[in-house]
Amino acid sequence: MLGRVASTSLLPPTIRQLLSNTSNSARVQVNGWVKSVRRQKNVTFAVISDGSSAKGIQAVIQNGSLAKVLTNGASVRLGGTLGDSPGKGQDKELRVEEVEVVGECDPAAYPIQKQALPVDYLRDNCHFRARTNTIAEMLRLRATASDALQQFFNSLGFCYVHTPIITSSDCEGAGETFRVAPPEPSEPATHPTENKPSEFFGHPAYLTVSSQLHLEALATALSRVYTISPSFRAERSLTNRHLSEFWMLEAEWSFTQSVNDICAVTEGAIKDVLSKTQPHAQVFAQATGRSRILEHLQTASSTPVWTRLSYGDAVAELAKYHASARKFHFEPAWGKPLQSEHERWLAEELVKGPVFVTDYPVALKPFYMRLNDDGKTVACFDLLVPHLGELVGGSLREERSNLLDKALESHGLDKTQYGWYSELRKYGGAPHGGFGLGFERLISWISGIENVRECIAMPRWAGRMLL
């Protein structure tokens, strides 16, 4: 008969767990990487991090032969006693009795040195940049934000679903898709008459730009659905807000008939994330010395209801300011898109906080948005936030078959290609709506990191993919 080994944990505790433990004089083992080494005459101090928290653990080594094998960047396994630290800057320290170097690292050749490293250098060494404090903290922030969003939507009865990465259509209808092509045959056909399809799936296929259309299909069965998934856009923009591969939180639910209801859910989700990621925001604010990071987040969290402003009123305010100060590069006018400079002025100067801009002209928005009674605008919103601009876009979806057909025509889209989407209205369709939130933009807003390329582990953008 086989016996079982009793265990209280599947894995040994992380440094974060050890530092939160109140017990002292405990014999522990620490696994991690050497972040710094400071040698004195009779004692050596080393900071060891396993990435579980922004702070590592200070290791105190009095045995010179043990200390001399420690170098920056090396991976180590240390054994010793955890106790209160008499020095400033840390509550606990590890008094080391055993040292094992698991992976050596030449400190002279190590690409990640202690001094500040340029952004472009870290992008060129993307496989190492998670070892820097800023990127490591950004990744922990991503994990916390993702977990908070899932908890929020689960609490509202939403079902988390997985949607296709490869699709047959362009959700936004903008033509900025990556096409999936089959490999070229390595050998000639076995039989001359063999008919191989020119497309892998029998027709053109693309990497998804949004999960929305598929979420709409699933919402007709499950009522409330959401996903956090990658999206791809072959847009050659090189601004600090664009990536070729990025992540989106998208939610869709049936039986909603008000843009204000969608705004309320959006606001609730983001406020919940802000609350749960506040410790991360504090770390970034302390590291950068930019108190505004915390100030605008705290203002957003404490505002009872975020401002709603129609597109028409927003353009009127922009035009009024432009007429008096001539501050905008692009002159605002009804029927024109809001530029980044317009979005930031509305959030930072006019409202001084997050603002939902609603009811855009129909010509500015995708085909699936519900036409308003005025016949000129659609029931939609963009959420604009200070120091970033657009963070979220959402709308009611057009549930009326005849108006959806007209929208497809006016956007020059093939009705046959979107036939399955139209059928959702034909068989038990219901009023519905939803939104999409750019995950890297959310991380940028919370952290104050200005470029979304530093808000994802390994960024891809036009002309750059190093690994």
Image: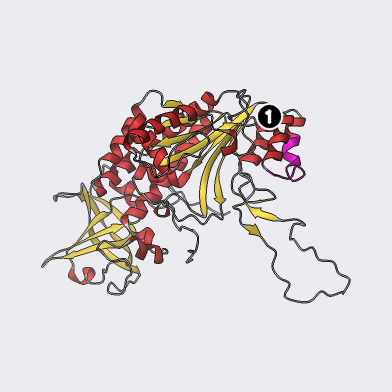
Say above or below: 58 vs 98.
above
Question: What kind of colouring is applied to the model shown?
Answer: secondary structure
Secondary structure beneath dot 1 equals loop
Give the class, few, some or many, for how many residues have Cα within 10 Å of label 1's Cα (few <14, many ≥20): many
Residue 416 lies in the magenta-colored region: yes
Q: Which residues are magenta?
A: 412-423
Residue 284 at x, y = what percent? 30, 46
Q: Identify residue type, mark 1.
A: Glu
Front residue (pair 253, 149) = 253
- Residue 319 in sight: yes
Q: Residue at x 46, y 57 (%)?
A: 459
Front residue (pair 451, 152) = 451
Front residue (pair 225, 178) = 178
Residue 432 at x, y = what percent? 63, 28
**Left or right, residue 195 beside residue 256:** right
Q: Residue at x 15, y 49 (%)?
A: 88
Give the labeled residue for mark 1: 399
Residue 154 at x, y = what percent? 53, 33
Say above or below: 425 vs 57.
above
- Residue 125 in sight: no
Residue 149 lies in the magenta-colored region: no
Say above or below: 379 vs 91.
above
Q: Residue at x 81, y 74 (%)?
A: 189
Rendered image quadrant of residue 188: bottom right
Front residue (pair 346, 426) = 346
Q: Quadrant of the N terminus?
A: bottom right
Residue 412 at x, y = what percent? 69, 44
> Can you name the residue that lies furthest to the right here?
193
**Left or right, residue 270 beside residue 185:** left
Say above or below: 35 vs 232.
below
Rendered image quadrant of residue 352: top left
